[in-house]
Amino acid sequence: MSWGGLAPLVILLSSLVPALLIFFLDESRVRLRNGLNLGGAVLKVSVVGVMLWGVYRGWRFQLSWELLPGVSFLLRIDSLSLLFMTLSAVLWLLTTIYAIGYLADRPHNRRFFGFFCLCVAATVGISMAGNLFTLFIFYELLTLSTYPMVVHRGDNASLRAGAVYLAYTLTGSMAVLAGTVWLYALVGPVDFVEQGGILVAAPEQRASLTLILALLIGGFSVKAALVPLHGWLPRAMAAPAPVSALLHAVAVVKAGAFGILRVVYDLYGAELAHQLGVLAVLLAFAAATIVYGSVRALFQTDIKRRLAYSTVSQVSYILLGTALFGSVATVGALVHLVHQGVMKITMFFCAGAVAETLGVHRVDELDGTGPRMPWTMTAFTIAALAMIGLPPFAGFISKWYLGVGALEAGAAWVVGVLLLSSLLNAAYFLPMLYRAWFKAPPAAWPQEATTPGSWEAPPSLVLPPALTAFFSLAFGVLAGTAISPLQWAQFIAALEYAP
Amino acid sequence: MNLWAGTILLLPLAPLLVAVMLVRPKALRLATGLLPLLPLPGVLAAFAAPEATSIELSALVLGLTLGLDQAGRVFLIFTAMIWCAVGWHLWLTRPWEEKGGRRFLFCYLVAMSGNFGVLLSLEYIAYYVFFSMLSFAAYGIVVTRDDEAVRKAGRLYLALAILGEMAMLGGFMLAAAGVAGLSMVLLLYFGMGVKHAVLPLHVWLPRAHGTAPTPASALLSSTLLKAGLLGWMRFMPLAGNEALSAFAAPMLVLGLGAAFYGALCGVLQDRPKMLLGYSSVSQMGIATAAFAIAAASSAVWEAVAALLLLFVLHHALVKAALFLSTGVRRRGASGGWVWPVLLLLSLALVGVPGTGGYFAKAMLESRLEQWGVGWAYQLLPLTSIATALLMARFLWLMRHEPGAYPGVAQAHVSPAPFLALSVLALLLPWGVLFVVHPQPLEVVSGLVTLKSWLPPTVGMVLGLIGWWLALRGLTLSWRVPPGDIVLPLEHALERLVHWPLRAPRMPNLPRLPQPDRVETALRRFSVLGICYLLLLLVFAVLAGALRGF
């Protein structure tokens, strides 16, 4: 094993080791637990930072060993892994800080943070997986380690949500497994390849390859919450706010979308995937999901449910970009993976902070929250405007690339879908902002917590959303700089479409 | 980066920095004091910056280019002056003492930044960025009170503004993908036209102008309204001459239609600010007609652009001054000047020879004659008559305008800013005429012909007859509710669903039964499983069918 193989291992262990240690710690060892958690998160962010520089220079890091003859476990860091890994590492750090503040003085924190670390280990595993087999292992690990977090509260609603979650995701995993096995049987072990996929379709294999692609995409789209497979996501709102942040931005829905990106670009290659015709179907489903999710969000009165349906809609932007052939649309899909993450996590952080501090859970209770919690609601406002896709926020960049990409791919109707979705986004986010900033506050808040000190809420609940809101703004305003997600997405797309 | 490039950068940046200052409540008063000063570099740059000053900011968004072209320069002159005068007026109303003053000022500053940005945007990404800032911030300066009429006006404005932005974005995406054609013309026409109040998207304008605080209406009607026109002039040619000239005739009809329809609805108002709003619809209709001429033939583009610049400069200054006049004291120190100046401004808007309104219309008429659209040429003088009636009604209503409304920036203050702006409105068109027109003397010599005096005179006589009848006790009982044609639509919408933008009704939104039931059914595992298998089957079959193996 060379030094290059050490990097994936460090990244994986930086959350796996804390996870295992935390399970053996006593519930009362708060400081040590938080120290382990934060230490692992900081270590991971720094290693990922070095990796970014290295991969940009053209280096690749990989680690593999053969489990069975012909089936190898392969961890590999390339440009696409880093896109997802950087997102999840940075957001994991922020979510950890947030969760420490949010869950302070509550029971079962050992279980929570243990599985929390495990989730993130699974997520980076997914991002680094170098072949379908490895991807599947981590994908399953993610499913299983997320379950205890969804049911963390332990009440009836949570348990039911957990059952639904398992039912959905395990079904999806079955499809992925079937696809994987079939593919291994058909063409033997294949690794992901950055430059436009590895599979070459012999005429007699086309039918099988088409079905395999359908199986894989169908399987991954459960976690990506593609309609009609999205039912688990709004239900999982029963979980506490840090878990929502994890589900919606850091790990779970992203893992589904990322799986599809990997299969389409690095296994089949964009060109072959299009020739097989499956992507045309995915395009239709993604477009329908975008509109359907937004329409459903419009009629939710619970803040978190509204945000959940918004996620259903927004994650499909990624699938939409993947389903369109052409490098511009690909850039849109890749960059939205990051943008959606920072925008949506901000909103969940804020929703959690408002619920904790003031007891506000419903949209109509938001009246006057702006002046009462200015930092939190400013962050929320920035994220909401970014979600709508207003310039110069991050969402605009994604929308622009998706729209132009659609036109270049000759699918002008997709632009209509994007614009309609923006309108709907405006229709369900702007009334919330109106209430927060323009309406007078109520005589008494539903359930006001006492906040020590001069902060509007504990700093650990205010700083993470402030930072992610800053990202939502900066990723748009500074999109042209060398360190923006847009540049990285263009870097990846250039590799994928390299001749 | 030289001095002028720095100034150009400073114009949109400085208001944003001051807006950030508002985080400290104590800075409120200081920030207000800065309002009249922030636009001054704009005036300076418009007059003194060298030809082709521009700056490229490739790191920002998708790469922005800011700079000054000829149109931008003229726009910058009047925009900066209006922001100065309105800032002065706003300072006099002491907004820092009012509840909600901080939010108002924040939005005001963001709108200022957006407005200057729009003028300086030489390509469409920058234009779109600043245009959105302007649109959204404008909502915050329109809606300052928590009452139903204001909320309704704000909602309608925002709904149309967003709709317009989406259309515009679609148009720009087409431009970026290199797909020129009629669809792009339509998207840009209606997208930017929302601000420019083209028929039938003008419905937001009278309501928003009528209910906003005085400084906000003054800005909306003058600078915000023109942002769309500047966009037309800069970006519509991207769609290609052929598509543009194909749409010229409908544009001419819509423009002249708005000119008369706006005047008609305006006369039937009973609040002076609503009336002025309709007057803007009418005047912008004339500008649309002028733009149609330019669109019809690229040969006359330059000449018509010059004419348009003169027209918008004049209209913006006059209309801003007229709106400010609704918020000034008409007694006491220099209050005695208000009525005579109002009369002069009204005459200028009518287009009495010697005023800016006349110059623009005279130039427009000669162009229409050349284009050979006889009927339009015959109709144009009639707009002077319509405007005269409208302004007579305005002056009549102003006599009975009640005192100040409570709220941010509503107080009646000294007329000094109004008078200063009026002087500019009356004199500046002369200066611009001599700069932009190739033969200014020819236009001036037209002052003494019968043809140019006839329509305004007829209008003024009719206006006087109206006054005389009104003094005799004749009242005008017909009314057009502000927003005219949108009312039936609003009723229909209200019945269809409780429109979610109707913020106050949020808690008792009805749940649409159908999607809910579908959703519940989907959650049952048996249904889900079958759906899932079916879905996979559909995937496979469709994929197979698409490729035919």
Image (spheres, coloured by chain):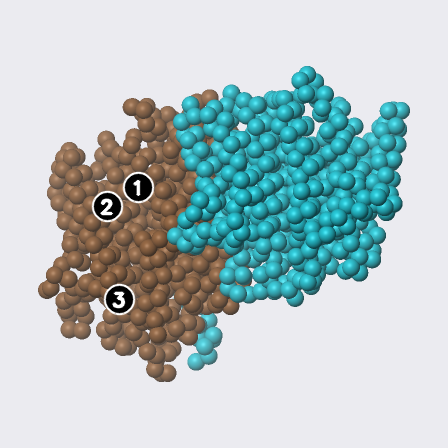
Chain colours: A brown, B cyan
Which structural element holds mark 3?
A: helix
User: In this rendering, do the residues under marks 1 and 2 share a single chain?
Assistant: yes
Residue type pointed to by label 2:
Phe
Q: Chain of mark 3?
A: A
Which circle marks residue A242 in the picture?
A: 1
Image position, residue A110 (x, y; %): 19, 40
Residue positioned 16% across, 64% down in the render: A63
What element does badge 1 sit on? Answer: helix
**Element type at mark 2:** helix
Q: Same chain for the residues at labels 2 and 3, yes or no?
A: yes
Q: Establish if B283 lies above or below B64.
A: above
The chain ID associated with circle 1 is: A
Q: Amino acid at mark 1?
A: Pro
**Disc 3: which residue:** A132
Tell me the quadrant of the picture where the C terminus of chain A can be found: bottom left
Q: Which residue is labeled 2 in the image?
A: A116
Q: Residue at x 64, y 32 (%)?
A: B421
